[in-house]
Amino acid sequence: MKSLKHIKGILDLPVVRQAYSTNLTKMPALQPKKLKGRMFSVQAALPKYPVAPLEQTLKKYLKSLEPLLTEDEYRHTEKLCKEFENGVGKTLQAKLIERAEKHDNWLSDWWKSVAYLGFREPVVINSNPGVLFPKADFSGTQGQIEYASKLIAGLLDYKVMIDDQTLPVEHLGKNPLCMMQYFQVLAACRIPLEKHDDWACYPPDRPGAPKHITVIYNNNIFEVPVYGDDGNPLTISQVRNQLLEVVNQGSTPGEPIGLFTMEHRDNWSSVYKKMIQDKTNKASFDSVQRSIIVLCLDQSNDFGNDPRTVSGHQMLHGGGPSLHSGNRWFDKTIQFIVGADGYSGLNYEHTTAEGPPIIHVMDHCLNFLANGKEWSPASDVKPPTKLQFNLTNDVSKSLTLAKENSARMVNDLDLKVFVFDEFGKNFPKSQKVSPDSFIQNAIQLAYYRHHRKTCGSYESASIRMFQQGRTETIRSCSTESFEFTKAMMDSNTSKQKKAELLRRAINSHKQYTNDAISGKGIDRHLLGLKLTALENNMEMPELFKDKAYTFSGSWRISTSQVPAKSESVLFFGPVMPDGYGFCYNPQEKCILFGVSSFKSNNVTLPAAKMADLIKDSLNDMRDVMASSMKANL
Ligand code: COA
C-alpha cells in the first residue's frame, strides 16, 4: 500500500505549496552518502528513479483505460493525450527531468508530502495498516508480560543491526534494494500540524537517538528505558521488570489521550497546538515522538466465534473507545500490540515506510520469541516514568468529541481476516505462473462476480530498486483480466478457453508488474507531471481534469501483497467509500487474507461475503487451470 486516496483533496494548491514552505523534518535531512555500513554498501550505486518517456507513459495509460471507459470516453481521452503529448506535456516533462537531475529521487519528498503528511483524514483505517501475528500460547497478565518482554528484547537484538548498519541488503530477485526505510522505522513519528503534518526522525547516526520505548497500559503512557546507562540493551528479564513496574503503576485507567491520534488531522492538530502550550504536555509528547516504538499492553477481548477477525479489528483501530483505541498512539511509526489472550500484532503509520521493512522487523522478533537468546545485563537501568498530561476544559471537551468520532469510524469498518488453505503459492508455481498475478486475477474475478463490472484497481509495487524508492501502482485491472473474468461467468465458454484467458490475464499482470518495479509504471510519472504544473503555477492540463483520470485512479479495489516468513497477515481499510481493501500473505500451502469494506455503503458487500467470493474464485481458477493442463497431456 498505499494508494493516493482522496487525491483531489490532497492536491489542493495551497496545501502543496505549504509543503514546500514547511520545515518537513525536525532533524537535518538524511545524508545517505555518509552512511557507509554493510547495510548501505550498494546504496550509492543504486540507480536514480528515472522519468519515463512521455510517449510510453501515455500509451500505457490509454491501454489501462480500455476496460474502464466507453468507446466515446476512450476517444475523448485519446485526443487529450495527443494534445498533451504535443503541447504542454513537453514543457512539464522537461521540467520534471530537470528536477530529477537535482534530486536523488525526484518523487520521494513529493510523495511523503502528498500521500501522507498532507493527508487530512484520520490515519486510522484510512492509512495505517494493522498486522496480526500468529496466535501464541499465553494468557493472563503474567503471560502477556513474558511475551511482550521477549518481543522487545527481539527488537533490541534487531536494532543492533540497524545501529551498526550491518543488516544485510535486501534483494528483489537479483537486484539490491534501497535500505533507507529500515534505517528510519525504529526512530520516527508523525506530528500533527495545521494543514500539513510534520515528521520527526531520530535515526542512530544522529545525536539524541532514542534509548527508550513508550509503553501504554490502561490508557496510561510511560517512558520506559530499554538501555542501561552503560549503553547496553536490557535483557529479557530486565525488560520484564520494567513492564511489571508499568503494570503496577498503571492499575488505574488513565485519560484516553491516544484517541486524539484517531482524529481528523485538522482536529488533532488544533488540540495539539493548545496542549503544547503547557510545558508538561510538551515534554510528554516529545518523549513519545522520540521513542523507538510504542508497545500497547491491552486488556482481554471477547473473541466471539471469529477470534482472528476480532483481533484484526484490535490491531487496525483498537476496537473503539470502549475497548483498546485509547491505548494507542497511531502517529508512531511502529506500535506493537500485545493482547492478554495470546493474540498480538502491530499497527504502523505509513509516512516512514511500506510493509516489507516493518514485516522484516516483525519476523525477526517472532523468530526471537521462539529461539531467543540472553546477553549480559545492562547496568544502571532507569525505571519507567509515567508521562503526565494536563487537560484544560477545552481539551477535555475535544476528547469527548474524539471518543464519539472514533466510535463512529470503528463501527463503520467491516473486516474479515482468514486463511485460504486449499493451496498456496505452490499451485500457481506448479502451473508455471506468478502466484501474485494469479491472486490478483482472483480478486478481479471476485469483484466481477458480484458487481458485474470492473473498476480502478491498485496494487503496490516496490520501486526500492532505486535510491529512496517507495512504491508505484500496478493497475491490476486490464483488458485481459476483464476478458478473463467475463469468460469465467459465461457458461458457454469452455474450460480450455477460460484457462487460456486466465494465462493471458496473468501474463499481462506480470508484465505490468515488471514494468512498474523497473521504473516504467505510469501513475507516479503522471503525478509528477501534475505536481510540476502546480508547482510552476501553470494552468492544470485538461488531461488531469478529465473524468477518465479521476475515475481510473479511484481505487475501488485497493490491494497489496505483504509476504512474511511467519503466518502473519496485514490489512487496511478501503480507500473509497464504495471500495474494498485486500491484503494477502501467500505461503507455500495457504494464503492469509485481510479483506475490508465499509458497512455504511450499500454498493459493496460485507467483507465476509467478499472473502467467500475470493475463496470461490481461487478454487474455480485452480480447477480450470488444472483441467486444461490435463487436457494438454
Ligand atoms: N513459474 C514458477 N514460479 C514463479 C513464476 C513462474 N512463472 N513466477 C513467479 N514465480 C515464483 C517466484 O520465483 C517466487 O518464488 P519464491 O516463493 O521462491 O520467492 C514466487 O513465485 C513469488 O513470485 P510472484 O508471485 O510473481 O511475486 P513477487 O514475489 O515477484 O512479488 C510484487 C510481486 C508486486 C508483490 C513485488 O514485486 C513487490 O513489489 N512487493 C512489494 C509490495 C509492497 O511494497 N507492499 C507493501 C505496501 S504497504
Image (cartoon, rainbow, N blue to C red):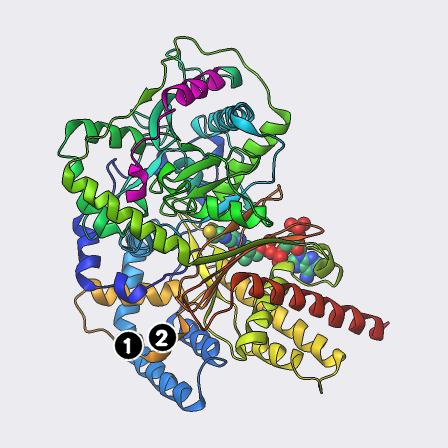
Q: Could you say where residue 428 lies in the image, as x and y percent from the top left?
A: 70, 61
Mark 2 touches mark 1? (CB < 8 Å):
yes
> Is residue 60 among the parts visible in the rendering?
yes
Checking the image for residue 7, the label placed there is: none
Query: What are the residue bounds of the magenta stretch?
Result: 238-260
Ligand 1 image position (quadrant): bottom right
Is residue 480 found left or right of 94 in the rendered image? right
Identify the image quadrant of the N terminus. Answer: bottom left
Q: Residues within 10 Å of mark 2 (few under 14, many from 20)?
A: some
What amino acid does circle 1 point to? Lys
Residue 258 shown in magenta? yes
* Residue at image coords 19%, 74%: 539
Residue 330 shown in magenta? no
Residue 116 against residue 346 in the figure, above or below: below
Is residue 618 found left or right of 462 in the rendered image? right
- Residue under pointer 1: 545
Q: Residues within 10 Å of mark 1 (few under 14, many from 20)?
A: few
Q: Secondary structure at mark 1?
A: helix
Identify the image quadrant of the C terminus. Answer: bottom right
- Residue under pointer 2: 549
* Residue at image coords 17%, 37%: 275
Q: Camera-side residue: 166 or 41?
A: 166
Q: Secondary structure at mark 2?
A: helix
